[in-house]
Amino acid sequence: MLHFLGFILLILGAVMLAPTPVAFLAGEADLLPYFIVPAAIAIALGFFIRRRFQPMEMTLGKAMVLVASAWIVFATFGSIPYIFGNNMAVEDAYFESMSGFTATGLTMVPGDPIATNVVISEVSILSPAGGGFIELYNPTSSDIDLRNLYGGSEELRMRLVNSSDNISTLNITWINSTIPAHGYFLFASDNAVDSIAADATFSAQLDYSGGVMIDDDLDLANGTIDRVGWGAGTVTNATEGAKVPNDLTTGDSIERKAWSISTAERMRGPDSRRGNGYETNNNTNDFVIHHDFYAPQNSSSAREEPVRNIQASPRTILFWRSLTEWVGGVGVVVLFLAALIGAGRAARKMYVAEARVERIEPSIRATARTLWKIYALFTLLGVVGLYLAGTPTLFEAVNHSMTGIATGGFTVRNTSFAEYGYPVLAISILIMMAGAISFAVHRRVMAGQWRELFQNIEVRLMLVLIALATLLLIWSVGLRDALFQSSSALTGTGFSTADISMWGDPQKGLLTILMTIGGGYGSTSSAIKLIRTVIIVKAVHWMIKRSFLPQRAVVPMKISGRIYSDQGMMETAIYAFIYIIVLISGAVVLMVVGPYSAMNSVFESASAQGNVGLSVGITSAAMPLAGKISMTIQMLVGRLEIIPVIAFIVYLISKVPRPRRKPF
């Protein structure tokens, strides 16, 4: 077994060297050691293990242990570039690496600094009389009662600072006191006249040069939550870092950025619905100035989740993320088998252990090579299609084709696919569906059996489910998002055109069902799989039908002309049952360790275990460690279809020395 693990380490070393040309082209040669050093270690270790251990016959159980070990080793080495090249914590880097190699797409990539508490998001002077408003934003995933902070009796206090740096406390009339998760809260002057209702009011004037402070205690030194100063005056008490230099005149406003690349123009356009969570504790960096423009929002306004700036990561790191998904889409062991010579029955058992059964060629090695040829062809076609459809750069086309055909979902854009036009989205849907269709079907189509594509029951069910889900979603989210998100969820890709965290529970529930079903058997998709879903539904119908027939009647269960035995139906049902139990267990862990709702927890759990990558905002570096560990395990369990991971755990337990019993 270890002999083959040594060969897998050699393959891993070669994979880790692949980003080196990208590092040179992107001018990021300083990142090369983070790939070359672990690659060299993997190769050296691989040669040593191969020399130290001889190949031997393997049972299916040991093959499963080997396969699970290979994925864990790949994720371990794959995390090193994230730790040293992208400043990620060890647990976040391992999560990211496992998410990549399992073609999941949930990400921990750090972006711009995001505020961790309530912040001042916009301030404006609306009239010469001094009327204005102060808007707050809640970047956290929990509602906050501003009159009952931290579950105690401390109430949020609002203070103004004038141009002479004098502080005065506002007398607030509370109409509402709760700022929703990812939502807003509006304080407005009595003199302010605007179309949006205030959540609280105050009787005071905002100075053209001044500042605002919010705190939770009378002790300003210890209780300050946020502050912002502006204008030419001395406003040290209200300033974080450097103040906003401009005075505010009538109709002007200052607004907190969504992320570092936000400008005043972007905050009135594409960044206007991406939250106001950017926080570097420097007012000049954190705010933009609007002239003759303001856009107050209150607690009833649409919620806006803060976003991470993925585009701030080095291009070499972004390519590495995409490459891990591309390799993991078909399978790290399938890559190994394509290069392996003379493994015989061991190769067959490893192939089965990596959740693959169907051969498309006479030998396992030939099957693995054909899989990679088809995979590479679709990847190339995807690159050409995306680039011609209007993808701005070849880099984006390459990365999104790789992660799309792998049904992985990592993107190189902050907003995933939200800013792409219809031609790019259409090509992307085709790529996602190609990845979610069995490679055996692709092989037959390439051999000239075109009818196989639409006669295959999994392909037909996939089209029906996407169409049905689109019809159900179209009334609430529109055709564009309904079709794209349905395709992304069912195929297990995880690309997104919408902020799903803002969707209602019925819409999230529908996507959860699609993510749990998954794509075709023998494809790059995970989850329960379409054919298993068909078998379970047909089995229920078969059992009902048989109950009305004589006891001795022989009624075979057929699907597409193939007869399924009782044992086959039972194995399918057992797998689906265990899959759901693990999924629910993962959701329970999230509900216990974090302030996450049941629906959001189930959604995130289904996304991790189904290797999908869609998120409602739970997955982030701020997620509790127990949640990260649980979801990392779920990603591996979902990719290897449970049993190999269980076999690996049992194998480890069996190797733990047990204390001998003393004789009486």
Image (cartoon, rainbow, N blue to C red):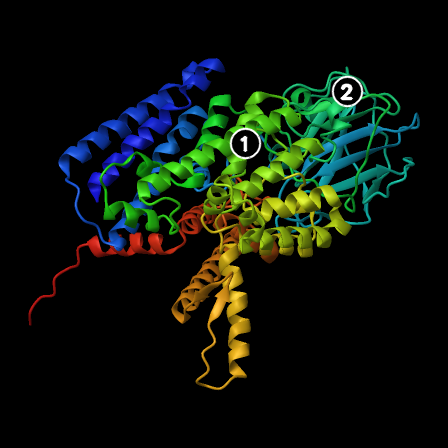
Compared across the picture, whether 140 is left or right of 564 comes to right
Extreme residue toward the left, this view: 664
Q: Quadrant of the N terminus?
A: top left
Compared across the picture, whether 172 is left or right of 376 comes to right
* Dot 2 or dot 1, earlier in sequence: 2
Q: Quadrant of the C terminus?
A: bottom left
Residue holding disc 1: 401
- When asked about the image quadrant of residue 574, the answer is bottom left
Compared across the picture, whether 93 is left or right of 1 comes to right
| Residue at the image point whose x is 63% and y is 54% from the top | 465
Q: Are marks 2 and 1 in contact (CB under 8 Å)?
A: no
Give x and y (percent) for residue 51: 15, 33
**Above or below, comparing residue 502 to residue 206 in the picture:** below
Residue holding disc 2: 164
Q: Badge 2, how many Cα within 10 Å: few under 14, some, many 20+?
A: few
- Of 198 and 437, the residue lying toward us: 437
Compared across the picture, whether 314 is left or right of 205 comes to left
Q: Is residue 347 visible?
A: yes
